[in-house]
Image (spheres, rainbow, N blue to C red):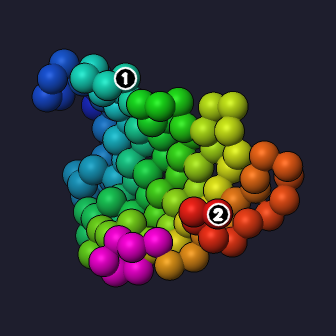
Amino acid sequence: MRLQSGIEDEETPSFKLYDDQGEIRATLSVRAADGMTLLEMRDQDGHTRTIVGVLEEGIAWLGVLDEEQRFRAGLGAPTGGNPRLDFYDEDGETRASLRIDNQGRFKTDPDS
């Protein structure tokens, strides 16, 4: 294993963790353009499969990707808001959603 730190595109500081084969397995970065902090984890084939981050709007977020690197599930907790869990189909459309509304009730419709 090896750890490398540096500056990427748009002055983005990052740390990269390499496996024994010299392949990147994880990247931690803070994007200069929007201030997002992201941890990307890759599988043995080099595909990003999990992303954990704090997004531009302050949302704490976990994204799970399939082997084709399509988002299939997302868990988010916005600043001052209510948490939600979404499941996506292969086209990226929300197929199921679970969230808590402002009254503390569970909702299964993403738009209700």
Above or below, comparing residue 62 to residue 85 in the picture: above
Above or below, comparing residue 40 to residue 78 in the picture: below
Q: Which residue is at the front of the view, 20 or 98? A: 98
Please provide percent x and percent y for residue 42: 35, 59
Where are the magenta residues, as a range?
89-94
Answer with left or right where residue 91 lies relative to residue 8: right
Residue visible at 64% across and 44% down in the picture:
77
- The numbered mark at residue 35 is 1
Q: Which residue is at the front of the view, 28 or 68? A: 68
Above or below, comparing residue 42 to residue 54 in the picture: below
Asked whether residue 40 is in view, the answer is: yes
- CA–CA distance in space, label 1 to label 2: 30 Å
Q: Amino acid at mark 1?
A: Gly
Label 2 belongs to which residue? 112
Answer with left or right where residue 63 lies relative to residue 40: right
Q: Give the residue furthest to the left.
A: 9
Above or below, comparing residue 109 to residue 9 in the picture: below
Label 1, residues with CA under 10 Å away: few <14, some 14-19, many ≥20: some
Q: Give the residue furthest to the right.
A: 104
Magenta stretch: helix, strand or loop mostly: loop
Q: Secondary structure at mark 2?
A: loop
Q: Which residue is at the front of the view, 64 or 15? A: 64
93 is within the stretch colored magenta: yes
Residue visible at 35% across and 31% down in the picture:
29
